[in-house]
Amino acid sequence: MLEWSGERIIPKLMKPMNGMLLEHIARYYFATPYIQGRVLDIACGAGYGCHFVAKDRKREVHEVIGVDIDAATVAYASREYHHQKVTYVQGDALDPQLPEKLGAFDTILSFETIEHVADDRLFMDNLYNMLKPEGKLILSSPFGRGRGMPTSEPFHVHQLTPQEFEELFERFTEVEIYYQRGPTFEKPREGVRYFIGVAVCTK
């Protein structure tokens, strides 16, 4: 059995009103209108998101690939969140061979992942190379002091500034930036401080 560490979300071990759990689930609800075809959930964790996507978008989705770096997590996801359209794979988001191994996708989901990787540009290259033309990328990340700067979160390499976050998506043809506040998503409002950015990008 996996343990909830404060970073890896295990819904079955958490109270339903846990704020972090609600935030994570809300991202999948937010993304559902954009999800179709062959779907990649990179750093899928326990697998609840892949399972939700496969069920909620059963008419629009024909395959979901969930990738996580941790073998025990992949085994847990395969067992606890099995679905006929979902395959869980152990893999490293920074593996330069990942596009060759996994192929191309119509939709890529990347929630709260980029702050964990040392080379966010290589990570973005991998995602871009795996996305089909006109495919959608939905990516979220917490904001912080910036690339290369220390963070108070023990599992985060760094946390990008809002400007650095937006610069990640310059090569995409269309980009919409939203901000997450608890389980809600909105365009920026004056006087409101936001801690998490969410980008919806079209290749």
Image: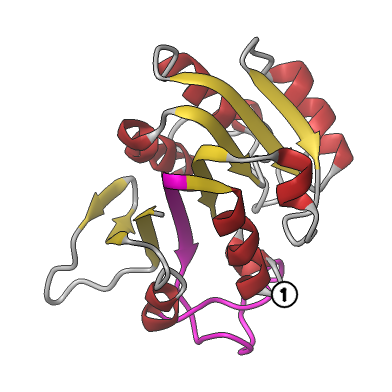
Q: Which residue is mark 1?
A: 118
The one nearer the camera, 167 or 153, is 167
Residue type marked 1: Ala
Query: Residue lying farthest bottom?
Result: 149
Q: Is residue 163 left or right of residue 46?
A: left
Verify whether residue 61 appears in magenta: no
Picture residue at 38% right of the left edge, 74% below the top? 166
Name the side, left or right, on which 10 lies relative to 189. Answer: right
The x, y position of residue 20, in whole percent, is 49, 48
Quarter the C terminus occupies: bottom left
Residue in front for this viewpoint, 39 or 161: 39
Q: Is residue 129 left or right of residue 100?
A: left
Does 157 lie within the magenta span? yes
Q: Position of residue 172 (x, y in %)?
A: 39, 63
Corner quadrant of residue 195: bottom left
The magenta segment:
133-161
Magenta segment, prevailing SS (helix, strand or loop): loop
How many C-alpha atoms fall within 10 Å of the one at disc 1: few (<14), some, or many (≥20)?
some
